[in-house]
Amino acid sequence: MIEESLLITYGAKIKKYKKNEYVFKEGQKARYYYQVSSGEVKMNNFLENGKEFVQSFFNAPRSFGEPPLFSDILYPANAVATKDSEILQLEKTTFLNLLRENPDIHLKVTQAIALRLYYKAIMATEISSQEPEHCILRVLDYLKKDVYGLSGPFSFKVNLTRQQIAHLTGLRVETVIRATKSLEKKNELLIKNRKLYR
Protein backbone atom coordinates (compact mmCIF):
# COMPACT_ATOMS: atom_id res chain seq x y z
CA MET A 1 0.00 0.00 0.00
CA ILE A 2 2.18 2.88 1.28
CA GLU A 3 5.95 2.52 0.96
CA GLU A 4 7.35 1.38 4.30
CA SER A 5 10.22 3.87 4.07
CA LEU A 6 7.74 6.76 3.79
CA LEU A 7 5.73 5.51 6.76
CA ILE A 8 8.91 5.23 8.83
CA THR A 9 9.94 8.75 7.76
CA TYR A 10 6.63 9.96 9.20
CA GLY A 11 7.32 8.12 12.47
CA ALA A 12 5.67 4.71 11.99
CA LYS A 13 6.83 1.97 14.34
CA ILE A 14 7.02 -1.74 13.55
CA LYS A 15 5.21 -3.77 16.20
CA LYS A 16 5.41 -7.55 16.52
CA TYR A 17 2.30 -9.63 17.16
CA LYS A 18 2.16 -13.31 18.01
CA LYS A 19 -0.28 -15.66 16.32
CA ASN A 20 -3.83 -15.11 17.68
CA GLU A 21 -2.87 -11.81 19.32
CA TYR A 22 -5.32 -8.92 18.89
CA VAL A 23 -4.13 -5.80 17.06
CA PHE A 24 -7.36 -4.08 18.10
CA LYS A 25 -10.79 -5.15 19.29
CA GLU A 26 -14.33 -4.38 18.16
CA GLY A 27 -15.60 -1.27 19.95
CA GLN A 28 -12.19 0.30 20.53
CA LYS A 29 -11.39 3.84 19.36
CA ALA A 30 -9.23 4.07 16.23
CA ARG A 31 -5.89 5.66 17.07
CA TYR A 32 -3.48 4.28 14.44
CA TYR A 33 -3.04 3.46 10.76
CA TYR A 34 -2.00 -0.20 10.40
CA GLN A 35 -0.16 -1.85 7.52
CA VAL A 36 1.10 -5.44 7.38
CA SER A 37 4.88 -5.68 6.94
CA SER A 38 5.01 -9.47 7.31
CA GLY A 39 2.59 -12.17 8.39
CA GLU A 40 -1.20 -11.97 8.14
CA VAL A 41 -4.14 -10.34 9.91
CA LYS A 42 -7.82 -11.19 9.77
CA MET A 43 -10.72 -8.94 10.67
CA ASN A 44 -13.56 -10.79 12.33
CA ASN A 45 -16.67 -10.62 14.47
CA PHE A 46 -18.28 -13.19 16.73
CA LEU A 47 -22.00 -13.74 16.34
CA GLU A 48 -24.36 -14.22 19.30
CA ASN A 49 -24.09 -18.00 18.94
CA GLY A 50 -20.29 -17.72 19.21
CA LYS A 51 -19.69 -18.46 15.54
CA GLU A 52 -16.85 -16.52 13.96
CA PHE A 53 -17.50 -14.41 10.86
CA VAL A 54 -14.36 -13.30 9.01
CA GLN A 55 -14.56 -10.00 7.17
CA SER A 56 -11.27 -10.42 5.29
CA PHE A 57 -7.61 -11.41 5.46
CA PHE A 58 -4.73 -8.96 5.00
CA ASN A 59 -1.17 -9.79 3.93
CA ALA A 60 1.81 -7.51 3.26
CA PRO A 61 1.73 -4.76 2.11
CA ARG A 62 -2.02 -4.29 2.68
CA SER A 63 -3.45 -1.94 5.27
CA PHE A 64 -6.55 -2.55 7.39
CA GLY A 65 -8.94 -0.75 9.72
CA GLU A 66 -8.77 2.69 8.06
CA PRO A 67 -12.47 3.76 7.82
CA PRO A 68 -12.80 4.60 11.55
CA LEU A 69 -9.76 6.90 11.23
CA PHE A 70 -11.71 9.10 8.81
CA SER A 71 -15.12 8.88 10.46
CA ASP A 72 -14.15 9.07 14.14
CA ILE A 73 -16.17 5.92 14.88
CA LEU A 74 -15.32 2.80 16.85
CA TYR A 75 -13.91 -0.32 15.20
CA PRO A 76 -16.78 -2.49 13.93
CA ALA A 77 -14.62 -5.66 14.04
CA ASN A 78 -11.55 -7.22 15.64
CA ALA A 79 -8.14 -7.42 13.97
CA VAL A 80 -6.22 -10.58 14.91
CA ALA A 81 -2.82 -11.87 13.76
CA THR A 82 -3.31 -15.29 12.14
CA LYS A 83 0.44 -15.95 12.30
CA ASP A 84 3.44 -14.21 13.87
CA SER A 85 3.36 -10.80 12.20
CA GLU A 86 5.09 -7.44 11.99
CA ILE A 87 2.77 -4.48 11.55
CA LEU A 88 3.56 -0.86 10.84
CA GLN A 89 1.67 1.48 13.16
CA LEU A 90 1.37 5.22 12.51
CA GLU A 91 -0.47 7.61 14.84
CA LYS A 92 -3.78 8.89 13.40
CA THR A 93 -2.95 12.62 13.26
CA THR A 94 0.39 11.96 11.57
CA PHE A 95 -1.26 9.57 9.10
CA LEU A 96 -3.82 12.23 8.13
CA ASN A 97 -0.97 14.73 7.65
CA LEU A 98 0.82 12.22 5.42
CA LEU A 99 -2.31 12.00 3.24
CA ARG A 100 -2.67 15.79 3.03
CA GLU A 101 0.96 16.14 1.97
CA ASN A 102 0.81 13.24 -0.54
CA PRO A 103 -2.40 13.42 -2.63
CA ASP A 104 -1.37 10.46 -4.81
CA ILE A 105 -1.17 8.24 -1.71
CA HIS A 106 -4.48 9.65 -0.47
CA LEU A 107 -6.06 8.52 -3.75
CA LYS A 108 -4.47 5.07 -3.42
CA VAL A 109 -5.89 4.64 0.10
CA THR A 110 -9.32 5.83 -1.06
CA GLN A 111 -9.26 3.35 -3.96
CA ALA A 112 -8.36 0.49 -1.60
CA ILE A 113 -11.24 1.36 0.74
CA ALA A 114 -13.65 1.66 -2.20
CA LEU A 115 -12.59 -1.79 -3.42
CA ARG A 116 -13.31 -3.29 0.01
CA LEU A 117 -16.76 -1.64 0.06
CA TYR A 118 -17.43 -3.11 -3.39
CA TYR A 119 -16.45 -6.56 -2.12
CA LYS A 120 -18.68 -6.24 0.96
CA ALA A 121 -21.64 -5.19 -1.19
CA ILE A 122 -21.15 -8.17 -3.49
CA MET A 123 -20.71 -10.61 -0.61
CA ALA A 124 -23.84 -9.37 1.16
CA THR A 125 -25.81 -10.32 -1.95
CA GLU A 126 -23.97 -13.61 -2.49
CA ILE A 127 -24.35 -14.83 1.09
CA SER A 128 -28.07 -14.10 1.03
CA SER A 129 -28.45 -16.13 -2.19
CA GLN A 130 -27.24 -19.29 -0.37
CA GLU A 131 -25.69 -20.81 -3.52
CA PRO A 132 -22.38 -22.13 -2.16
CA GLU A 133 -20.55 -22.67 -5.45
CA HIS A 134 -21.43 -19.23 -6.77
CA CYS A 135 -20.55 -17.60 -3.44
CA ILE A 136 -17.13 -19.31 -3.32
CA LEU A 137 -16.29 -18.30 -6.89
CA ARG A 138 -17.20 -14.67 -6.19
CA VAL A 139 -14.83 -14.56 -3.20
CA LEU A 140 -12.00 -16.20 -5.15
CA ASP A 141 -12.55 -13.99 -8.21
CA TYR A 142 -12.48 -10.88 -6.05
CA LEU A 143 -9.16 -11.96 -4.55
CA LYS A 144 -7.74 -13.03 -7.91
CA LYS A 145 -8.68 -9.97 -9.95
CA ASP A 146 -9.14 -7.11 -7.52
CA VAL A 147 -6.60 -7.90 -4.81
CA TYR A 148 -3.81 -9.69 -6.70
CA GLY A 149 -4.47 -8.39 -10.24
CA LEU A 150 -4.24 -11.82 -11.87
CA SER A 151 -5.95 -13.15 -14.97
CA GLY A 152 -5.92 -16.38 -16.93
CA PRO A 153 -7.23 -19.80 -15.94
CA PHE A 154 -5.81 -21.29 -12.72
CA SER A 155 -3.24 -18.48 -12.35
CA PHE A 156 -4.36 -17.76 -8.79
CA LYS A 157 -3.12 -20.13 -6.07
CA VAL A 158 -5.59 -19.76 -3.22
CA ASN A 159 -3.63 -19.43 0.01
CA LEU A 160 -6.71 -19.97 2.15
CA THR A 161 -7.75 -23.13 3.95
CA ARG A 162 -11.23 -24.55 3.41
CA GLN A 163 -11.98 -23.33 6.95
CA GLN A 164 -10.93 -19.77 6.05
CA ILE A 165 -13.11 -19.84 2.92
CA ALA A 166 -15.99 -21.01 5.13
CA HIS A 167 -15.42 -18.09 7.50
CA LEU A 168 -15.34 -15.62 4.59
CA THR A 169 -18.53 -16.91 3.00
CA GLY A 170 -20.57 -17.84 6.06
CA LEU A 171 -20.73 -21.45 4.84
CA ARG A 172 -19.95 -24.63 6.77
CA VAL A 173 -16.53 -26.12 6.06
CA GLU A 174 -18.16 -29.38 4.89
CA THR A 175 -20.18 -27.38 2.36
CA VAL A 176 -17.01 -25.66 1.11
CA ILE A 177 -15.27 -29.03 0.65
CA ARG A 178 -18.20 -30.47 -1.32
CA ALA A 179 -18.63 -27.30 -3.39
CA THR A 180 -14.92 -27.03 -4.32
CA LYS A 181 -14.87 -30.68 -5.45
CA SER A 182 -17.95 -30.02 -7.56
CA LEU A 183 -16.34 -26.88 -9.03
CA GLU A 184 -13.25 -28.89 -9.96
CA LYS A 185 -15.44 -31.35 -11.90
CA LYS A 186 -16.94 -28.37 -13.73
CA ASN A 187 -13.42 -27.11 -14.56
CA GLU A 188 -13.96 -23.92 -12.54
CA LEU A 189 -11.23 -24.80 -10.06
CA LEU A 190 -8.08 -26.91 -10.10
CA ILE A 191 -7.12 -28.87 -6.99
CA LYS A 192 -3.44 -29.80 -6.86
CA ASN A 193 -1.65 -31.06 -3.72
CA ARG A 194 -4.74 -30.04 -1.69
CA LYS A 195 -4.39 -26.41 -2.90
CA LEU A 196 -7.06 -24.62 -4.92
CA TYR A 197 -6.28 -22.75 -8.13
CA ARG A 198 -8.72 -20.39 -9.84
Image (cartoon, rainbow, N blue to C red):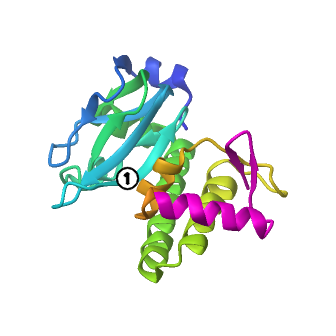
Residue 98 drawn above or below residue 108 = above
Say whether residue 190 is left or right of residue 38. Answer: right
Given residues 175 and 45, the one toward you in this image is: 175
Residue 88: x %, y % from top left: 41, 25
Q: Is 65 positioned to the left or the right of 144 in the image?
A: left
What residue lies at 32% left-to-right and 49% top-to-bottom?
44
**Residue at 44 percent of width and 51 percent of height:** 56
Q: Residues within 10 Å of mark 1 (few under 14, many from 20)?
A: many
In this picture, is 157 found above or below 118? above
Quarter of the image where the N terminus is located? top right
Q: Position of residue 118 (x, y in %)?
A: 50, 67
183 is within the stretch colored magenta: yes
The three-letter amino acid code for the residue at tag 1 is Val
Front-most of residues 154 and 71: 154
Q: Position of residue 85 (x, y in %)?
A: 43, 23
Q: How many marks?
A: 1
Q: From the viewer's side, name the closer residue of 164 and 32.
A: 164
In the picture shown, does residue 50 fall above or below 18? below
Q: Position of residue 34 (x, y in %)?
A: 38, 34
Q: Is residue 18 magenta?
A: no
Residue 188 in sight in this render: no
Label 1's element?
strand
According to the image, label 1 marks what residue?
Answer: 54
User: Going 52% across and 52% down the picture, which residue do you hit?
Assistant: 112
Q: Give the magenta part as a residue range.
A: 174-198
* Residue 187 occupies quadrant: bottom right
Q: Quadrant of residue 167?
A: bottom left
